[in-house]
Amino acid sequence: MTAIAFLIGVIVLVLGLAVSIALHEVGHLLPAKLFGVRVGQYMIGFGPTLWSKRIGETEYGLKVLPLGGFISMAGMYPPAPEDAKPGTKRSRFFATMVQDARDANAETLIAADDRVFYKLPVYKRIIVMLGGPIMNLVLAVVLFTIALSGIGIQQGTTTVASVSQCVIPASEGRTECTPTDPVAPAAAAGIQPGDRFVSIDGTPVSTFAEAAAIIQRSPGKQLSVVIDRDGAQRTVQFTPATTDRAVTDANGRSVVDASGATEYQTVGFAGISPQSALVRQPIGTSLEATGQYIGSVAQIVSQFPVRIYDVVVDTLNGQPRDANSPMSVVGAGRLAGDIAAVDAPILDRVQTMITLLGGLNIALFVFNLIPLLPLDGGHVVVALWDGIKRQIARLRGTVARPVDATKLVPVTFVVVILLVATGGVLFLADIVNPVQLL
């Protein structure tokens, strides 16, 4: 069953990624058609075509490798300048690439046809190119909303799971009570597993975190606690004991001092452990999660060379990889399989899988905004460059020639080679030294 669950997780990830790519291209397709651009192809994947169907002037289809997609717009670039010169022997390789790009672009042009991309106003070209990443962003928000507000996240509830019988300072590192340990306040007050906290010290509580915060800041202070037991409310009193707790940082890790010893702080303690349950979050939580994911992915992208180097070093040294290290589709697939196969309630696994797909869409959003061709961000830069060039020419009383972006094909070639190389490194690392779920 574990192997079947793993396979299901991989399949869900592949299908989810394919849908994300398809919607990304729809984000380009819709505004392009809305602005009147002639779109020859809408394809998902690369390589030989598995299936296609022409509807109107556009051919829709699927290709062998579902690792991307594209739409073919007429006149993506302006016609080659009449005075364009062939390259010298030294640059013949790149000159040939530029000419091939111009020839391919020329095939999409039809005489006296103004339904071409390069003739659109700058703002429309930007809308077309940003349509794909924006679609991924919207999809991520939808997925996070389903995961966080539709299903929820595991949180401690106000229902008591267990009650400690004694107070044991965290610094002593033991779990068993001794005859000299004081009785835990909650046990002394008669609180039982299954009781649900309604309010503490006059403050209504809806989560365990809210209840714990009141208790921890009230050592030595008697608190009046309203609980619900079997549908009937009753009031009990207890005074939180004074105990120590390890200080943790924003990531939940213990803070140590200069000597390496764990730091502790004095807090109130009642001796209560909560039941956990999937708690639905407010709708706005998905926007917060989206912002956090964008920041995390942007940080990874900004440090990409360093991150790739760390992946190589960890793999060669046999060290576990950072959980936040970049990964290939293979790595994402393995992670999805691990999530599906983990020993946890099915709804928890579904929630985690949806969150993973949301994170992948954020990665597609951020990655495609990198201002380098052939990425969408590179096309946006070209459009802005063309607009600035036209404005300068207008101020001078002249007419600017459209930006010949085919001259950037060598740069595009280098970017593609780098992407393929890093993808190969991550592919091998994800096989030899994958990111571990736990």
Image (cartoon, helix red, strand yellow):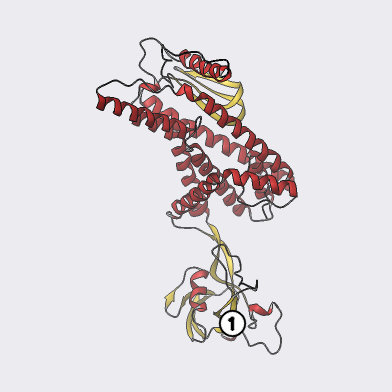
Q: Residue at x 70, y 42 (%)?
A: 429
Where's residue 25, x and y in %? Answer: 49, 31
- Where's the C terminus, which quadrant? bottom right
| Residue 272 seen by the camera | no
Mark 1, Cα crowd under 10 Å, few <14 / some 14-19 / many 20+, is some
The residue lying furthest to the top in this view is 111
Relative placement, left or right, of 312 versus 22 is right
Where's residue 278, x and y in %? Answer: 55, 59
Judging by the rendered image, the residue that carries numbered circle 1 is 243
| Residue 407 seen by the camera | yes
Depth check: give the residue in front, 236 or 32: 32
Where's residue 390, x and y in %? Answer: 31, 26
Q: Amino acid at mark 1?
A: Thr
Depth check: give the residue in front, 103 or 389: 389
Q: Residue at x 63, y 36 (%)?
A: 423
Q: Residue at x 52, y 45 (%)?
A: 302
Residue 352 drawn above or below residue 272: above
Residue 44 drawn above or below residue 88: below
Relative placement, left or right, of 138 versus 350 is left
Residue 140 drawn above or below residue 54: below
Q: Residue at x 59, y 69 (%)?
A: 255
The residue lying furthest to the bottom in this view is 180
Q: How many marks?
A: 1
Where's residue 130, x and y in %? Answer: 42, 35
Residue 326 drawn above or below residue 211: above
Which element carries disc 1, helix, strand or loop? strand
